[in-house]
Image: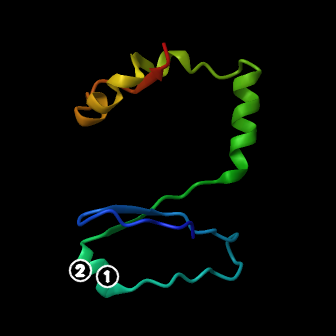
């Protein structure tokens, strides 16, 4: 698992453990339950298939994926905190650009 730094009560921690193929020996993680309860930490997992990134980048480079329609609007980097604080339900993706 990647190292996680605890910042304060109510943190949400995304666990990134290496996941072996189905049927392989499972990875065990050690957690101190008391620390999780006392610090009010939420542990959340997310499934990612690392073997798809290369194929996706190749499709993008070849122009076979049309991603421009997914971008709802572009904002300057200094606007990102406001966008994250008040996300609009109607927006699919907001792209931060350096001006």
Quick one: label 2, few (<14), some, or many (20+) residues within 10 Å?
Answer: few
- Is 32 located above or below residue 4 in the figure? below
User: Among all residues in the image, which is located at the extreme top?
Assistant: 99
The residue to which callout 1 is attached is: 35
Quick one: label 1, few (<14), some, or many (20+) residues within 10 Å?
Answer: few
Residue 22 at x, y percent in the picture = 67, 72
- Is 12 located above or below residue 58 in the figure? below
Which circle marks residue 52 in the picture?
Answer: none
Residue 3 at x, y percent in the picture = 53, 67
- Is 18 located above or below residue 96 in the figure? below
**Front-lying residue, 81 or 68:** 81
* Mark 2 residue element: helix
Residue 24 at x, y percent in the picture = 71, 78
Contact? badges 1 and 2 (CB < 8 Å)? yes
Tell me which residue sits at (70%, 69%) in the image: 21
Q: Is residue 18 left or right of residue 39?
A: right
Q: Is residue 18 left or right of residue 14?
A: right
* Mark 1 residue element: helix
Q: Residue 58 appears in which quarter of the rendering?
A: top right
The residue to which callout 2 is attached is: 38
Tell me which residue sits at (69%, 35%) in the image: 56
């Amino acid at each position: 698992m990647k190292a996680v730094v605890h910042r304060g009560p109510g943190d949400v921690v995304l666990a990134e453990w290496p996941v072996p193929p189905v049927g392989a020996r499972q990875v065990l993680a050690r957690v101190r339950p008391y620390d999780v309860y006392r610090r009010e930490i939420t542990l959340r997992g997310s499934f990612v298939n690392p073997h798809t990134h290369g194929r996706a980048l190749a499709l993008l480079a070849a122009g076979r994926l049309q991603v421009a329609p997914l971008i709802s609007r572009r904002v300057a980097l200094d606007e990102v905190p406001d966008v994250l604080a008040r996300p609009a339900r109607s927006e699919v993706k907001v792209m931060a650009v350096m001006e």
